[in-house]
Image (tube, rainbow, N blue to C red):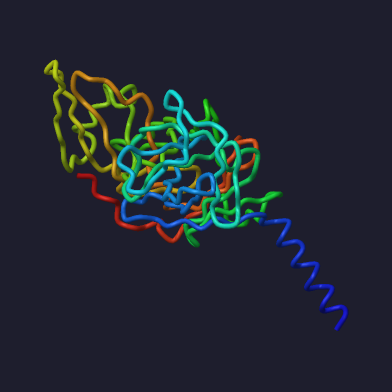
């Protein structure tokens, strides 16, 4: 009996050391991840996890009050954010930033600063680790960290040829991928992708921007290949898309483990790997 109890306590202690924190999330029909948070012990908010930022923000279109976040010149420092049993201190909020559907604002990767963390789409949760967990079934991908944002390289199979480019991980965009203007220009994507829709807008000066949506035959991320990926790009006089995005509809197709130094991410297919792609209107 003593041996069994000792073995149980030993295994339990290992699990506590391995998985330090678990934070549940809800994924919306727009592929956005929502966590329920309490800010400064007063304001109960639904915040969208935004992997493309470190700080937090409040939306002008929020449905819930954020009256206990005090802003000066659009910035509020020193806030405490509680999510479940976990509290995060000294969180900076920006005011009046648009966010995803069903959210009052955004929360970024700063809550995981200096820690290993996992986006576990299979079980709808974030897991924070003290030491690297079991990586069986995962593949390592080099991660580039710039100005609080995370990038990976991926191969786009266009007209049968691989074209590599860097993608910003962007969980706020509901769709698959968006190409930067630099990547899209001169590649004749109108002819090489199957175009599924387009929309043209004009500004007050009469300059136009056209959003085109198409289907990329294959996207390779490390050893994994996604087929018939939803892909968007812009044409027209206005050149505003500075980075290529790997959107939430691609992110959800993997479980992601980020190392503490943000130099490597480990991925494996999730239960959403073969889902139909989100339709961008």
Residue depicted at x 15% and y 18%:
207
- Give the total of numbered labels: 0
Residue 157's place in the image compared with 138, above or below, is above
* Image coords of residue 120 (percent x, y): 52, 55
**Which is more toward the observer, 181 or 204?**
204
Residue 169's place in the image compared with 43, above or below, is above
279 with respect to 13 (left or right): left
* Image coords of residue 263 (percent x, y): 61, 35
* Image coords of residue 10 (percent x, y): 80, 67
Task: Quarter of the image for the C terminus: give it.
Answer: top left
**Do we see residue 5 in this rendering?**
yes
Rendering quarter of residue 88: top right
Task: Quarter of the image for the N terminus: give it.
Answer: bottom right
Residue occupying the far top of the picture: 205
* Image coords of residue 141 (percent x, y): 55, 40
**Which is more toward the observer, 22 or 276?**
22
Residue occupying the far right of the picture: 2
99 with respect to 110 (left or right): left
Residue depicted at x 35% and y 55%:
28
**Do we see residue 249 in this rendering?**
no
Rendering quarter of residue 13: bottom right
145 with respect to 206 (left or right): right
Residue occupying the far bottom of the picture: 1
Residue depicted at x 50% and y 35%:
55
């Amino acid at each position: 009996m003593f041996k069994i109890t000792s073995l149980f306590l030993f295994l339990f202690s290992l699990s506590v050391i391995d998985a330090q924190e678990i934070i549940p999330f809800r994924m919306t029909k727009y592929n956005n991840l929502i966590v329920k948070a309490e800010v400064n012990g007063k304001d109960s908010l639904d915040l969208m996890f935004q992997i493309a930022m470190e700080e937090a923000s409040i939306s002008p279109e929020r449905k819930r009050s954020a009256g206990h976040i005090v802003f000066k010149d659009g910035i509020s420092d020193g806030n405490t954010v509680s999510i479940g049993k976990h509290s995060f201190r000294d969180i900076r909020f920006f005011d009046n930033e648009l966010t995803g559907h069903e959210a009052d604002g955004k929360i970024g990767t700063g809550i995981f600063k200096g820690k290993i963390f996992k986006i576990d789409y299979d079980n709808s949760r974030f897991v924070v680790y003290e030491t690297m967990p079991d990586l069986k079934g995962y593949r390592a991908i080099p991660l580039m960290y710039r100005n609080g944002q995370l990038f990976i390289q991926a191969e786009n199979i266009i007209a049968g040829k691989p074209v590599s480019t860097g993608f910003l991980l962007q969980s706020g965009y509901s769709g698959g991928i968006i190409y930067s203007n630099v990547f899209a220009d001169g590649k004749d994507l109108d002819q090489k992708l199957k175009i599924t829709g387009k929309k043209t807008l004009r500004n007050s000066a009469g300059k136009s921007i056209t959003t085109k949506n198409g289907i990329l035959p294959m996207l390779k991320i490390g050893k994994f290949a996604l087929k018939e990926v939803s892909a968007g790009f812009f044409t027209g006089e206005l050149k505003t898309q500075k980075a290529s995005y790997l959107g939430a509809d691609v992110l959800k197709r993997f479980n992601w483990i980020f190392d503490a130094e943000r130099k490597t991410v480990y991925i494996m297919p999730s239960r959403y790997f073969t889902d139909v792609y989100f339709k961008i209107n």
